[in-house]
Amino acid sequence: MSFRGHPWLGAISGLFLGLGVAILLQQFSIRPLDNLSFFGLPLLGIVLGLLVAAWAPFRRGGVSVSAGPATMAGPATVPAAPTVPTQSEPPPPPPSEPPTG
Amino acid sequence: VRRNTSRLVRLAVAVGVGSFPLLLAAPARASVTLGPCDGSVTIEGVTYTPDNDTPDDPVLVPKESGVTVGYEGNTGGVVIKNHNGYIAVDVGPIPIKVATWSGENADEQVSKADTYALDDAYAKLPFDVVGLYRVSGKHEGEGGSCEGFAYVKIEGNPITTVPGAAAVAVTVAAVGGVAAAGRVKRPSR
């Protein structure tokens, strides 16, 4: 299984999510802390965290990322100009020209 | 020995059990896994028996002051001498012992009935506790042995308690952690 997100963070957070839910259920008198909720819910949380880490539905830093792994080579999408022809600033120079020297 | 027995019952109530006699019940009762014992507890006019052994039908312990609990319990006529035992709150597979006792029972007691003020129990706790608990216990010695469990619901608002608030905080933080785990990770170079 390949992870586009953060599997360790997902597993640990899922573990605590399961424990938290188990304790909340106990505190709200819905279910005691028996074996099933003590082990089952944290295990379910770990699985959930790993699934979320594998799916990775959230974009990083607000940058639009299309399906597939993000890359640093060029913008993934170009939300700029075609529909806005009246740009006041010229497009930035291409980054590929280093200063001569 | 009488002192030990009395302490036993007080401690049972102190952990919210209020129903130690329920742990000493007849084998035919579902909440008892071993022994000839029986008993009951009365809280605010409601009498609980060993039949209160499911999460849906727990012993209700009110979270208010001035409540006195009446209890009675017996060992089915069996004299248990040189006894010892415990009461534990079950957390998953782990019974966390909250009370232990031992004694000779030189005067050969086989039953006990008394009352206990819940305020004394609450005063011993470091913070308020509410919720649904599975409480187990055992009493054994020369002549016999009793073992069983009961479900106890301590009424109250969980959000206002330390464990409840902590559980909410942990859950919220964990939701954030799972969401963060779902962010596309920075590619490695």
Image (spheres, grey):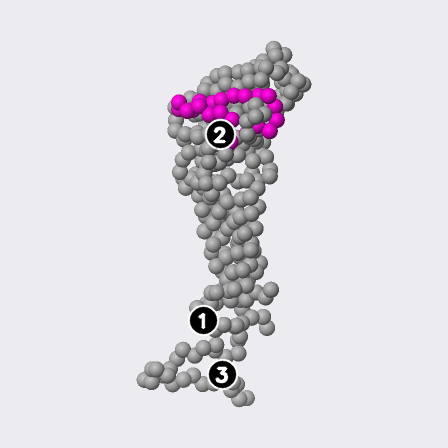
Residue B122 position by quadrant? top left
Residue positioned most to the front: B28
Q: Amino acid at mark 3?
A: Pro
Q: Is residue B7 visible?
A: no
Start and end of the magenta stretch?
B31-53
Q: Characterize the local packing of mark 1: few (<14), some (14-19) or many (20 or more) Cα atoms within 10 angstroms.
A: few
Expressed as whole percent of the image width and height from the top left, the position of residue B127 reads: 46, 34
Q: Which mark is nearer the camera, 3 or 1?
A: 1
What type is the residue that disc 1 sits on?
Val
Secondary structure at numbered mark 1: loop
- Give the residue number, with chain letter if any, for mark 2: B52
Q: Which image quadrant: the N terminus of chain A?
A: bottom right
Identify the residue at horizontal 46%, vertical 36% (top origin): B56
* Tag 1 and tag 2 share a subunit: no
In the picture, the disc for residue A95 is 3
Percent position of residue B125, x then y: 48, 31
Residue B81 lies in quadrant: top right
Residues tagged 3 and 1 counted as in contact (Cβ below 8 A): no
Residue B44 lies in the magenta stretch: yes
Closer-to-camera residue (A49/B186):
A49
Looking at the image, residue B66 sits to the left or right of residue A72; the answer is left
Q: Are marks 3 and 1 on the same chain?
A: yes
Q: Tag on residue A63?
A: 1
The answer for which chain carries disc 1 is: A
What residue is at 48 percent from the left and 40 percent from the top? A31
